[in-house]
Image (cartoon, rainbow, N blue to C red):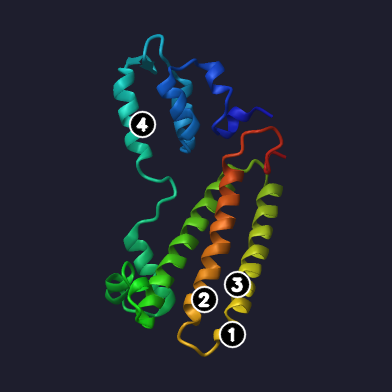
Amino acid sequence: MDKCRRSRPMASLRDKCPVNPEMAALLDICPVSWFWRVILDICPINNSYRGKNIPMRNLLCIVLSILSTSVYAIDVDMVIAETAKRTYTPIEEVRQHYKTGCSSGVTPWMNICSAYHTTEIDMELNAVFQRLIKQLNTSSAVNKLKKAQRAWIKFRDLSCDYSSDGWSGGTGRGIIYGTCFETLTEARTKQLKEYLECTYTGCPGDW
């Protein structure tokens, strides 16, 4: 399979278009899939992109500006709105406590802060999942990933229900549940990102 079709970071890019050390460093860290298509059209011989002269220094500044924001960053207002929806809490109350509630010592505010963070990482997980789905080559791979994700979500929710069972009926249950939720979701997000950024032959979804 031609890996170039996946538009993913790969060491062979340096062979296709030799770059200076600064650009080589960007090739190692940049996770934006469409960026690789641009890089393939850029060579330091003439510092051009599609026939247009662009100083390499200016190009680097543009790229670094793009990289300053996480590819998977979720808008704060969206997270606040979703947290309010999931917890049946007024938006303004979530906005007031989502930053400081965790260290406030006031259980309701701590629950709001915890709920905000679990919502944020869940939305990030969903964003990574959707990007991965779009990257897969066959309907078979898509169906298998969706089936695996549904099973994983069930595992996560049941596991966190179990870990917080001792707090059932208590005001601190949400915090205990949230800690478990964050731990498992962050691990799953990391795993999906590894699938998304896979570069070797035989990556999941290459079938």
Q: Position of residue 101 (x, y in %)?
A: 34, 73
Q: Which residue is mark 2?
A: 176
Q: Amino acid at mark 4?
A: Val
Q: Are marks 2 and 4 in contact (CB under 8 Å)?
A: no
Give me the C-alpha separation between circle 2 and circle 4.
Answer: 40 Å
- Of labels 2 and 1, earlier in sequence is 1
Report the amino acid beneath label 3.
Asp
Q: Residue at position x 42%, y 23% from top?
A: 23
Task: Name the front one of labels 1 and 4.
Answer: 1
Q: Residue furthest bottom?
A: 169
Determine whether label 2 and label 3 are within 8 Å by CB.
no
Q: Quadrant of residue 85?
A: bottom left
- Residue under label 3, please give it: 157
Q: Is residue 53 left or right of residue 37?
A: left
Sequence-first disc among 4 and 3: 4
Chain-order first, disc 3 or disc 1: 3
Give residue 48's position: percent from left, percent from top.
37, 15
Q: Secondary structure at mark 1?
A: helix
Residue ID at (33%, 69%):
98
Helix, strand or loop under label 2: helix
> Mark 1 — residue?
166
Question: Is residue 70 toward the left or the right of residue 191 in the image?
Answer: left
Neighbor class of circle 1 (other Cα within 10 Å; few <14, some 14-19, many 20+) is few
Nearer the observer, 136 or 180:
180
Q: Which residue is mark 4?
A: 63
Please tell me in which quadrant of the rendered image residue 94 appears: bottom left
